[in-house]
């Protein structure tokens, strides 16, 4: 019985020295933000060329902001994941 208690104590003491690796960042609203849907026109609405170009420009901006956010998260994850291995 003494040996079982001694062995389990040593086993549990060894778990305290185990390092889990780099901590994950706090999940802020900026990190976990879902990309906004792209803007569209109603198909039955007559749209001029200026409005169409403005809509395309807004959609490009939405896409590139979302891509920048996702790419920075992937870059952070891959750098920290390689450091912990």
Image: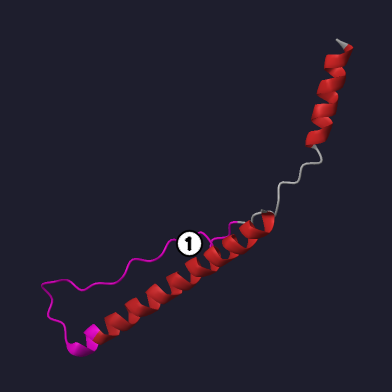
Is residue 78 rendered to the left or right of residue 63? right
Q: Quadrant of residue 7?
A: top right
Magenta stretch holds residue 78: no
Q: Quadrant of residue 16?
A: top right
> From this viewpoint, is residue 30 visible?
no
Q: Quadrant of residue 25?
A: bottom right
Nearer to me, 80 or 73: 80
Residue that carries the numbered disc 1 in the rendered image: 33
Is residue 8 rendered to the left or right of residue 58? right
Report the coloring of the rendering. secondary structure
> From this viewpoint, is residue 20 visible?
yes
Q: Position of residue 61 (x, y in %)?
A: 39, 79
Q: Residue at x 82, y 34 (%)?
A: 14
Nearer to me, 40 or 13: 13
How dense is the environment of label 1, judged by Cα within 10 Å: few (below 14), some, or many (20 and up)?
few
Q: Residue at x 85, y 27 (%)?
A: 10
Q: Position of residue 15 (x, y in %)?
A: 78, 35
Examine the rendered structure and indicate whether residue 78 appears above or below residue 5.
Answer: below
Identify the element where label 1 is drawn. Answer: loop
Q: Residue at x 16, y 82 (%)?
A: 47
Magenta stretch holds residue 45: yes
Look at the image and give the residue range highlighted in magenta: 27-52
Q: Residue at x 29, y 72 (%)?
A: 39
Task: Name the magenta segment's main secondary structure.
Answer: loop
Q: Position of residue 71 (x, y in %)?
A: 50, 69
Nearer to me, 48 or 13: 13
Examine the rendered structure and indicate whether residue 15 appears above or below residue 81.
Answer: above
């Amino acid at each position: 019985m003494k040996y079982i208690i001694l062995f389990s104590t040593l086993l549990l003491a060894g778990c305290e020295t185990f390092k889990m690796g780099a901590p994950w960042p706090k999940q802020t609203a900026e990190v976990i933000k879902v990309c906004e849907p792209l803007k569209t026109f109603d198909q039955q609405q007559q749209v001029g060329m200026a409005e169409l170009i403005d809509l395309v420009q807004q959609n490009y901006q939405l896409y590139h902001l979302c891509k920048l956010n996702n790419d920075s998260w992937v870059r952070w994850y891959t750098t920290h994941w390689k450091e912990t291995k």
